[in-house]
Every structure is written in C-alpha cells, then in structure tokens.
Image (cartoon, helix red, strand yellow):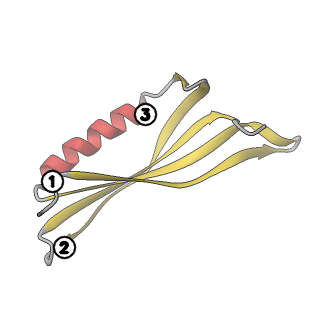
Amino acid sequence: QDPPYPAVVFNEIFSEAFRDYQGHGDLDRTQFQFDIIGEDYNRLARIGRQLELCFLGIDGTFANVRLWGARLLNRTREPYEPDAELQRLMIEFELWHDNTSP
C-alpha cells in the first residue's frame, strides 16, 4: 500500500549548549530538519510556510523549558525524483531555549 501524501519527515540534526567566555552558558540550541514530500510542489510550499510560521512565532514556555525563539536556516527545493514521481522540500530551523543540562 502506498503511503499517504503529502508526508512530513522530522529529524533532530543536533543539539548543543551555547558557550561563552565564562564557560557553559544558559542557552542551548537545537537544529531541526523537516522534509515535506508529495506530488504537488505548491501544496508542499504551503505546508512549509505553515511550519515556518509556527517555528518563527515561538516565544514562551513548553514542558517547563523557556523557548527564546527560532530562525530559519535553510529552505531548499530538492530535485524532482522521477522514479518515485515525488517532489521534496527541505526546511531547517534552529531553536534557542534555556539550558536543560544539570
């Protein structure tokens, strides 16, 4: 059975603590990647824009962690995949949040 499209695939690329001249800082940053896959690129672009609005509007607390904001790192339209007959849009974000290390 074919999977339903469009599909969104999420990956956490990395997470690291911010360091300053005093040592370990109070902020962490985490990078996320979303691959949006489907047959109609215009539909993928609309979904991608909604993800951007969600991430770029972040400001507040989630699961007792203070979120300070996000920035868009990359938005790439990948080449058409003729064997699968699918389009792919890749979007990467960086999220800044309070340090959660002990």
Q: Identify residue type, mark 2.
A: Glu
Identify the image quadrant of the C terminus: top right
Q: Identify residue type, mark 3.
A: Leu
Q: Secondary structure at mark 2?
A: strand
Q: Calculate the distance from the C-alpha at mark 1 to the C-alpha at mark 3.
A: 25 Å
Identify the image quadrant of the N terminus: bottom left
Image position of 62 (left or right of 46): right
Is the C-beta separation of discs 1 and 2 under 8 Å? no
Residue 90 location, x and y as percent?
A: 33, 57
Mark 1 burial class by Cα count in 10 Å: few <14, some 14-19, many 20+? few
Looking at the rendered image, the disc whose residue lies closer to the viewer, 3 or 2, is 2
The residue depicted at 27 percent of the width and 40 percent of the height is 49
The residue to which callout 3 is attached is 56
The residue depicted at 70 percent of the width and 36 percent of the height is 99
Residue 22 location, x and y as percent?
A: 89, 40
Q: Identify residue type, mark 1.
A: Tyr
Residue 8 location, x and y as percent?
A: 28, 51
Q: Secondary structure at mark 1?
A: loop
The residue to which callout 2 is attached is 81
Image position of 50 (left or right of 15): left
Residue 96 location, x and y as percent?
A: 59, 37
The residue depicted at 57 percent of the width and 29 percent of the height is 67
Q: Calculate the distance from the C-alpha at mark 3 to the C-alpha at mark 2.
A: 29 Å
Residue 92 lies, with reference to residue 58, above or below; the image says: below
Image position of 5 (left or right of 48): left
Mark on residue 5?
1
Question: Which is nearer the N-term, disc 3 or disc 2?
Answer: 3
